[in-house]
Amino acid sequence: MQAYSLNVERWRRDLLAGASVFFISLPLCLGIALASGTPLYSGLIAGILGGVVVGAVSRSDLSVSGPAAGLTAFVFLAVRDLGSYEALLLVVVYAGFLQMLFAALRLGLIGDYFPSNVVQGMLTGVG
């Protein structure tokens, strides 16, 4: 894998690609937020974080991230069951810290014990 350089031409292409993806995913981000029962600004924040932050820290040349319409029902039910949007945010922050802890402890190896067809089936069900 190649290290990300500060090549101006590459940054120009990445900026153009990022702007294209932003304008395509903006209505989807807002629609998912509305359908999930969360404030519209949460869709904007999720789209910006997913597009800019993930793209900036990813070491992959082909990294794509953004809104996932398949998770709309899960978010809607989580807000309903937890009682508020703020409670959902707290759970998401805790989950993020847990993921960072697992990464620091190199516990990603746990995934090797799950058959790949089980993971693919779960992702197909969500999609």
Image (tube, rainbow, N blue to C red):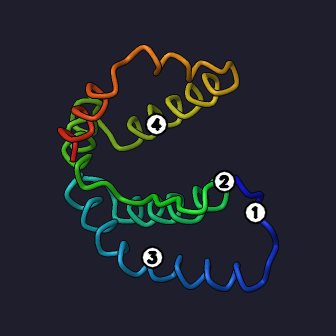
In percent of width and height, residue 11 lies at 70, 79
Residue located beneath label 1 in the image: 4
The answer to which of marks 3 and 1 sits earlier in the sequence is 1
Label 3 SS: helix
Q: Are marks 1 and 4 in contact (CB under 8 Å)?
A: no
The residue indicated by pointer 3 is: 22
Marks 2 and 3, Cα distance to the nearest angstrom? 20 Å
Q: What element carries label 4?
A: helix
- CA distance for labels 2 and 4: 24 Å
Q: Which amino acid type is shown beneath numbered disc 2?
A: Arg
Number of the label disc, if any, that sits on residue 59? 2
For badge 3, the amino acid type reads Phe
On screen, residue 6 versus residue 40, left or right, reads right
Badge 1 vs badge 2, beta-carbon distance below 8 Å: yes
Label 4 crowding class (10 Å Cα cut-off): few <14, some 14-19, many 20+? few
- Residue 21, horizontal then vertical, whole percent: 44, 76
Spatial CA distance of label 3 from label 4 is 23 Å
